[in-house]
Amino acid sequence: MASKWRKAKLALGLNTCLYVPQTSEDSSPSNDVAAGRFSDVASTSPMLSPTGLAADCRLPTTPTPSSSGLRLPKSGSKSSKRTCAICLNTMKPGHGHAIFTAECSHSFHFHCITSNVKHGNQICPVCRAKWKEIPFQSVASNLPHGVSRINSVGWPQDDAWMTVLRRLPSSHMDASRQIASLFHAPEPAIYDDDEVLEQQPEIREKSTPIADAADNDCTGTLEVKTYPEVSAVPRSSFHNNFAVLIHLKAPHISDRQNGSRNHTILPRISQNSRASVDLVTVLDVSGSMAGTKLALLKRAMSFVVQNLGPSDRLSVIAFSSTARRLFPLRRMTEIGRQQALQSVNSLISNGGTNIAEGLRKGAKVLIDRKWKNPVGSIILLSDGQDTYTINSPGGNHPRPDYQSLLPISIHRNNGASLQIPVHAFGFGADHDASSMHSISENSGGTFSFIEAESVIQDAFAQCIGGLLSVVVQELQIKIECVHPSLQLGLIKAGSYPTSMTADARMGSISVGDLYAEEERDFLATVNVPVDASRTETSLLKVRCIYRDPITKEMMTPEEANEVTIQRPETTRQVVVSTEVDRQRNRLHAAEAMAEARAAAENGNLAGAVCVLESCRKALSETVSAQSGDRLCAALCAELKEMQERMANRRVYEESGRAYVLSGLSSHSWQRATARGDSTDSTSRVQSYQTPSMVDMVTRSQTMVMGNAPRQRNLQPAQSFPARGQPR
């Protein structure tokens, strides 16, 4: 009978996270750290949430067979020096004693508090606050051999006893009524209650020469280079569709330049060396997010909160059948972090999926705010399909109207004055990749495909690693023909808006924001005329104008970058620029992906695979491929991966579509996206990760909340070499 009762108690905790603490008998030097790994988010740092719910969400960043779950704070932290109010002994880590931190922020030995509440006591022994979350303990010795509890992410099996945090049912309402209360409580009509910002410099419209900006200790200058397709064209020859590559590289962050990348402890990006961020997270808490998904989402959001600076502001929107602003724009000071984590840890899953309503409220937060940080962005995560706004295909709507999901106020093609990119994350096999890609594409953001649940935090880390390193804003590239007979043909810029004058003598590219050390490559084509009277022909002038987000000044170059070619009588051998050829390969691969996707959507998977294979073969025969170019090799590997994910309709529906769309998003914006089931697959085919992104992902993979990361010598983990490095 006792065994059945224990099993019944275990059943109550099936949607919570579990931990197996070690006893003093089976502890060893190698397992000392794991001996006391049960703690909620609040207990790892005084800045973290005091809510008890966090105890069920302290998952390892990347669960592995060696991960035992939740970690106790190391000695030296404030929480580890507290005294248990029940036994009056000091709470020390590493002695097999787990620590429970209640929602009122008071901490106790786990075995002390479970003994205190086992008879139904829900009152804090210190402040007499009534708890909604209580711990309970159950013996695991009578489980069938080899069977573990809640092991969906590969945690080790339990062999002694476990602790579970159990949500108490309210004495006044059931779970569904709690959801209703959460999402239907009154909200202000205007979200103008954002926290005031620190004093910031006013926007200066007066232009500053880029050459004079070299004294700026924070960002340096924007690097601009041009590469003609070939260096020489015979005077008597006419060259059709002659390509000119425009290469940009954003300034670095001064802290990184000083060698901080090699520190054994990963440095935070200095708040003074980057633009502050207003970030709104729009999170899916529908019924399908229950269990491990929601726990991992809370864990990932905890990481985001901890890595925002005191000048950054965060707001949290949760949506299911409807949407609710849980947390207004607040600076991530110590108090702000606590409040944000309390909001995140209060999330419970139920209901349908109303993405449009979540985005509407997310956009409203940024539109209604009184104060504005230089960088504003929305992070959207969903594991399902919108069931409230999108009409099913058929009748007068042969294709779903995905654009209706995105508020007009932030649609980049509707002349919106406020540019707010939505970085969308499709979670799992059941999300609507087409709608998520459409949302990101129409807002100027990226679409990431999170195939494995355990990668969600790393995906968020990569995104905020970029957002927290913006060094260039409102970047415009101006292209002007120099030779009187010259006209612009095409400007190939992916998803970036381009324009051209009626006489095709001038063109422009609107690039927008750049992260620190981020690179962009654009191709412009012209028709080189016959010019028998000159030994050199000037083709184009390229200049860039942008705003420095720190000083707010508009930066303009003193001199434009001029593209010239030699005009000899004859040329013995035409040597094609490897730089131009490799970017042609990238554009060719992106076009093949788009064509294959269109074929797959029309049911022609065999044709889609054929398109990808044909492109792969063509790339292998190019000049850059013959010289061993790593970009070309990586593109071929990516095309091969897409072919495998189009093997049949089931595979394409489950992962192929999302993988291809994430790749298209990455290549069209030349910006890193998470893709596939691990960060390894992302780095294998990803050329757009910046050093700041790499550092943040490494922090996610190595850092224990509240503790320093393990020693690691960081390098820019790019699959492709940086400009100027050997290929």
Image (cartoon, rainbow, N blue to C red):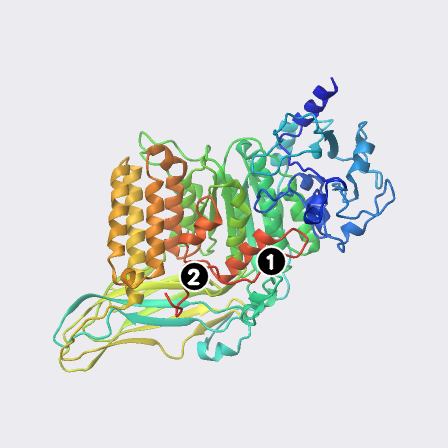
Q: Is residue 198 above or below residue 560?
A: above
Q: Which residue appears farthest toward the right when viewing the image?
A: 88
Quarter where residue 572 is shown:
bottom left
Q: Closer to the camera, 550 or 59?
A: 59
- Where is residue 694 drawn, in percent x and y? 51, 58
Quadrant for the N terminus, please. top right
| Amino acid type, label 1 | Asp
Question: Which comes before the other along the chain, label 2 or label 1?
Answer: 1
Residue sitting farthest toward the top: 1
Residue drawn at x 47%, y 38% as measured from the top left: 428
Confirm or deny contact between disc 2 and disc 1 (CB under 8 A). no
State the residue in front, 404 or 49: 49
* Disc 1: which residue: 312
Q: Residues within 10 Å of mark 1 (few under 14, many from 20)?
A: many
Q: Can residue 327 be seen here?
A: yes
Whether residue 325 is visible to the viewer of this picture, yes or no, is no
Q: Which residue is pictured at 80% across the width and 51% down the height?
A: 81
Q: Residue at x 34, y 41 (%)?
A: 644
User: Which structural element holds mark 2?
Assistant: strand
Alpha-carbon distance for marks 2 and 1?
20 Å
Residue linked to disc 2: 512
Label 2 packing within 10 angstroms: few (<14), some (14-19), many (20+): some
Up-down relation of residue 26 to residue 495 (above or below): above
Q: Identify the mark at residue 722; answer none if there is no mark.
A: none
Where is residue 7? Give x, y as percent.
Answer: 68, 23
Foreground pick, 29 / 655? 29
User: Which element type, helix, strand or loop, lies under badge 1?
Assistant: loop
Which amino acid type is shown beneath numbered disc 2? Gly
Question: Residue 245 is drawn in which quadrant?
Answer: bottom left
> Looking at the image, is 532 positioned above or below residue 44?
below
Horizontal side of residue 398 vs 199, given as left or right: left
